[in-house]
Image: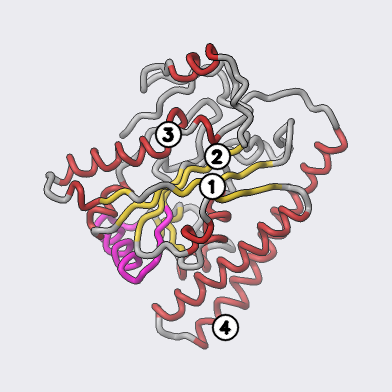
Amino acid sequence: MPRTANLPQHFWRTLLNSAPQNEQAAVPVFDVPKIKNPLWYAYHIFLKYFSFFLFGFGSVLLSIIAIPVMKLFWPKKEAFQKKAHAFVSFLFKFFVTVLRVTGGVKMSVNDIRKLRSLKGGVLVANHPSLLDVVFLISMISNADAIVNSKLAGKNILHFIINNLYISNSLEYEALIERCSDTIKNGNVLIIFPEGTRTKTTGQNPYKKGAARIALAAGCPIYPVFIGGNDKRGLRKGDSMLMYNTASIYDYRFYLKEPILADEFKNEPGPAAAKHLTQKIHDALCYENNLSFLYGLNPLNPLVKSSIK
């Protein structure tokens, strides 16, 4: 259970008295205690480097061997992508298992069976770390995702991404069409409404892309809040030599009740997207999920994330 039960009332008052949406908190959301065991800390830094090497090596093998071979066995695009998505999910599951066995991370899910059985919808989640999409795909064999176009450029990942996932560099109409098609094929489209990893001082403004896609596809939205402790070292801009100073990375996934896009289908497009994004925000914002987080910094007012 999160270590929040014994916190004094003034702590919660500090957290809930959020600053205006356009302001930035001056201190991190999570506390950063001093390193108590330098050897333990050094081991986990080494483990980070090892995991990055393992992931990169696996990506090379997937690009030059697995995907070309799978294309030969399943030349039709829909059949190939179905098999390839499941295979990538299996590989990510193996990667996560290695991290867990070696003591790099721990994880829990409130309803793993329900998460694995999701079909034909948009999965939205907050984005505290670099590994979020890896964990989610490892648990959802029919997962699809919108990927940053920089990753789909001229590097070892471009072959995987261009064959299996959706680049955010597509024109708006083409992007909506691709997303609607993959959802209609029964896939679960993973989107992080913040657009990038969460800042150390609070969440980023929520964008309306997930809502627009769900409205266009007429599909449900599955909110997943990623809680646990500080993901120091895996956040945006963090150094490879950084790690959580208090404990191993703790990932706690909370699948919430679906949000139905049809509730807003009779509203004008812009209004529907705004109201649906507000529902997504309410399901994923920190201030509504404090009980799923621990190691919080009592000096941070937990700035409410706004909506673009």
- Disc 4 element: helix
Q: Where the N terminus falls, by quadrant?
A: top right
94 to 76, vertically: above or below? above
Of discs 3 and 1, which sits in the foreground?
1
Q: Say whether marks 1 and 2 touch (CB < 8 Å).
A: yes
The amino acid beneath tag 3 is Cys
Tell me the kind of residue under disc 4.
Val
Q: What residue does disc 4 label?
A: 69
- Residue at 51% from the left image edge and 74% from the top image edge: 84
Looking at the picture, which amino acid does disc 2 mark? Answer: Gly
- Judge left or right: residue 113 versus residue 38: left
Q: Is residue 165 above or below residue 284?
A: below
Give the magenta range: 169-190
**In the rendered structure, does residue 199 fall within the stretch colored magenta?**
no
- Disc 2 to disc 3, C-alpha distance: 11 Å
The Cα–Cα distance between marks 3 and 4, rounded to whole angstroms, is 42 Å
- The residue that disc 1 covers is 253
Give the residue number, with chain letter if any, for mark 3: 285
Q: Secondary structure at mark 2?
A: strand
Q: Measure the alpha-carbon separation of dots 1 and 4.
A: 34 Å
Single out the residue that lies furthest toward the bottom: 73
Please state if 50 lies on the left or on the right of 76 as rendered: right
**If you read the primary sequence from the N terminus, does the residue marked by circle 1 or circle 2 appear first?**
2
Label located before the other in sequence (1 or 4): 4
Tag nearer the camera, 3 or 4: 3
Name the mark nearer the viewer: 1 or 4.
1
Q: Nearer the viewer, residue 262 or 127?
A: 262
| Residue 48 x/y as whole percent | 73, 47
Q: Which residue is mark 2?
A: 227
Query: In screen coordinates, is 93 left or right of 172?
Result: right
Mark 2 nearby-residue class (10 Å; few <14, some 14–19, many ≥20): many
**Kind of residue sitting beneath label 1:** Phe
